[in-house]
Image (cartoon, rainbow, N blue to C red):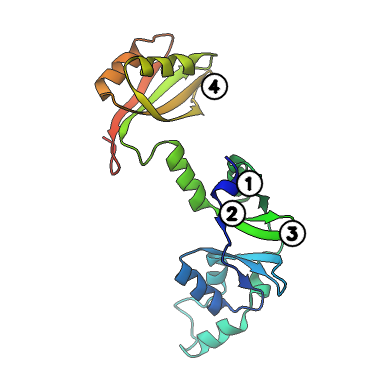
């Protein structure tokens, strides 16, 4: 899956001459937390986050009057506070690479470029939605976490066993276990009961063991 498949196209932007007041109003109206900053030619020149704007806004304990605050914020422009060295990605960037870039740089969004043209933005919210989808977070089924030896063919054995008892795999993901010789496999399965699924996986042996089992609906896992 690539960034171009899940990015927000035609992202909302702000001009470098816009004030803090204008940017805050735009964010609140559009319910977004960051804005790419563009020049008069529409070229990307920076990015601002809601946190950037709040940092330059007077605190509630300020001695400024309610008349002075709007005047002050109207004088501070995006060019004064924006991040200029913007980290970007392209439409062909793998989603996991975009997520790694965000995590490594502690940022919540990446403008998406096609050459020198801004064509989209991918944010932490987009990544969370993809994570939910990949793990079946909005699907009803049995959620099973299994400890599996780090050996070839283990996933094939598990998926074959699930198919054998009539289960339908909705989602499957793996993580390194606490012991580097194992992996934790989380699978969400429909069309079987929790008890039957746990029993079937238990029959596999070979160091495969169930760590957690629960029935998940759209609103809870129990």
* Marks 1 and 4, how far apart at CA: 25 Å
Residue at image coords 71%, 75%: 40
Location of mark 1 (residue): 101
Q: Quadrant of the C terminus?
A: top left
Q: Is residue 61 left or right of residue 85?
A: left
Residue at image coords 43%, 12%: 207
| Residue depth check, mark 2 versus mark 4: number of the one nearer the observer | 2
Q: What label sits on residue 107 in the rendered view?
A: 2
Residue at image coords 47%, 68%: 30
Q: Residues within 10 Å of mark 3 (few under 14, many from 20)?
A: few
Location of mark 3 (residue): 116
Residue at image coords 50%, 69%: 27
Q: Is residue 27 left or right of residue 97?
A: left
| Residue depth check, mark 2 versus mark 3: number of the one nearer the observer | 3
Against 173, residue 99 (above or below) is below
Residue 178: percent from left, percent from top: 49, 25
The mark nearer the N terminus, 2 or 3, is: 2
Asked if the residue at tag 3 contacts the one at tag 4, i.e. Cβ–Cβ closer than 8 Å, the answer is no
Q: Secondary structure at mark 2?
A: loop
Against 107, residue 68 (above or below) is below
Asked if the residue at tag 4 contacts the one at tag 1, i.e. Cβ–Cβ closer than 8 Å, the answer is no
Picture quarter containing residue 55? bottom right
Residue 51: percent from left, percent from top: 54, 65
The mark nearer the N terminus, 4 or 3, is: 3
């Amino acid at each position: 899956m690539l960034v171009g498949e899940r990015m927000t196209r035609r992202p909302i932007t702000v001009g470098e001459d816009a004030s803090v007041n204008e940017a805050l109003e735009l964010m609140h109206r559009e319910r977004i937390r960051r804005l790419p900053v563009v020049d008069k030619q529409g070229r990307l020149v920076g990015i601002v986050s809601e946190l950037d704007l709040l940092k330059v806004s007077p605190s509630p304990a300020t001695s400024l009057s309610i008349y002075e605050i709007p005047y002050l914020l109207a004088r501070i422009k995006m060019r004064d506070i924006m991040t200029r060295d913007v980290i970007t990605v392209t439409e062909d960037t793998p989603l996991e690479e975009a997520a790694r870039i965000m995590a490594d740089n502690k940022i919540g969004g990446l403008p998406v470029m096609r050459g020198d043209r801004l064509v989209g933005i991918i944010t932490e919210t987009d990544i969370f939605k993809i994570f939910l989808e990949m793990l079946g977070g909005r699907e009803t089924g049995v959620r099973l976490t299994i400890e599996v030896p780090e050996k070839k063919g283990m996933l094939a054995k598990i998926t074959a066993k699930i198919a054998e008892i009539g289960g339908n795999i909705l989602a499957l993901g793996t993580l390194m276990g606490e012991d580097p010789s194992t992996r934790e496999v989380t699978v969400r399965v429909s069309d079987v009961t929790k008890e039957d699924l746990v029993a079937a996986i238990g029959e596999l042996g070979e160091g495969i063991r169930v760590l957690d089992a629960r029935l998940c609906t759209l609103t809870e896992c129990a």
